[in-house]
Amino acid sequence: MITKMSFLTESKARTLLEEYGSPLYVYNEQIIRNQAQALKQAFANWKKTRFFYACKANTNIHLLRIIHEEGLGLDCVSPFEAELGIVAGFKPQEMLFTVSSMSDGDMDFAVQKGILLNIDDLGRLEAFGKKYPGSEVCIRLTPEIVGGHHTKVQTGYKDTQFGILFDEVPALLKIANQYNLKIVGIHEHTGSGLTAQHVLESMRQMMNVAPHFPDLQFIDLGGGFPIPYRETEQPFDVSGFAKEVIEKFKTFCNEYRRELELWFEPGRYLVAEAGILLCTATTLKNRGAKTIVGVDTGFNHLIRPVLYESYHHITNLSNPNGKTKEYDIVGNVCETGDTFAKNRSIAEIRIGDILTFHDAGAYGFSMASHYNSRPLPVEVLLSNGKVKLIRKREALQDFL
């Protein structure tokens, strides 16, 4: 059992909302650095471990710079993510380009920038070989493992659209040989919000197929490291996980007769717990035994509860010691589905109280939209005791 604590006091939160407006995303720089350092320390016994931040979790340029300062690389799924990475200071050789349904334009962009492509389709691999024979490339394989916190983020099962199947490896090798492509890495990503066992099963699959690829420099096991969204959940034991992974990878490398690099792509693990979404209670409606609380944000700002039925812990920062009551928490989007929580026990909520949505640093702002023509929230960063504005409030002009 853990206790979700806000890294802001009520008075500090109110000061921020008075200055920047509600709703407001707030990030804590030190938590991001702590998470990055925990990963590096856990895998210190395999010096050839590299981490590539899956920046689709949050692409704010200021967060990217923090992660670059921590010595991590960048996993990109679009040209603009790569461009943002370059602006943040990442070198092309510190990036991996993993684009779904890759177009010719996507492919040409990565080659022109000097970023390693991660190709997950035989047709695209052939197109790449024809245009860029003799190039190095990474191949995304389907681990054929089912894992992830929701069906919509399970990317490793056999019928998914992601990756090349194991029974397609002979055709893959034929294309690579035909165009003299050098396969320097193999990659998999099983899903998001995985258990250690899921990653270990996918790792076993990758090590089994690796002997078909004699020129490997690395094996990339993707990301999906979980964080405890609920107070009843335990933090991911990254040290224990790393110990088991290193032991198995060391045995594999001895059999492969060469030490390879071990790559991971953490996203949520690095930034989720570093971010909160502050909002304000605007309405209270009694519906029999139920009380519905309306707030000044919606799924246009935090879509995970609607899209994935995800849980975000909610606390009343203004009345933390109030009597606990059950509430439905709903947003201000004009849809019945705009619901953050149902029958949630929260300290008594009054109109004007500040609510905290915890663990909102990943897949929060990055998945936000202008639905209902509402502006995106402001983002601020807490850094060395100071508050830094890292995304300004939008105005009508931004919609025109």
Image (spheres, rainbow, N blue to C red):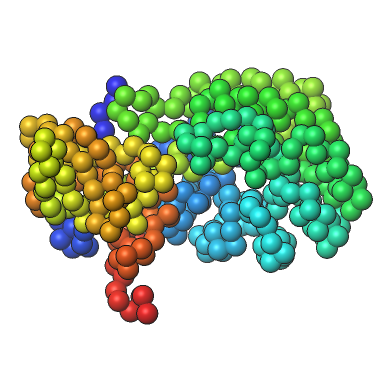
Extreme residue in the right direction: 178
**Residue 124 to residue 48: above or below:** below
The answer to which of 73 and 321 lies nearer the viewer is 321
In the rendered image, residue 289, in percent from the top left (x then y), is placed at 11, 35
Which quarter of the rendered picture does the N terminus lie within? top left
Residue at the image position 19 percent from the left and 46 percent from the top:
355
Residue at the image position 29 percent from the left and 74 percent from the top:
395
The reply, left or right, for residue 98 in relation to residue 330 is right
In the rendered image, residue 7, in percent from the top left (x then y), is placed at 24, 41
Work out whether residue 49 can be spotted.
Answer: no
The reply, left or right, for residue 260 in relation to residue 191 is right
Extreme residue in the front direction: 288
Which quarter of the rendered picture does the C terminus lie within? bottom left
The reply, left or right, for residue 356 in relation to residue 132 is left
In the rendered image, residue 68, in percent from the top left (x then y), is placed at 51, 51
In the rendered image, residue 345, in percent from the top left (x then y), is placed at 18, 32
| Residue 212 figure quarter | top right
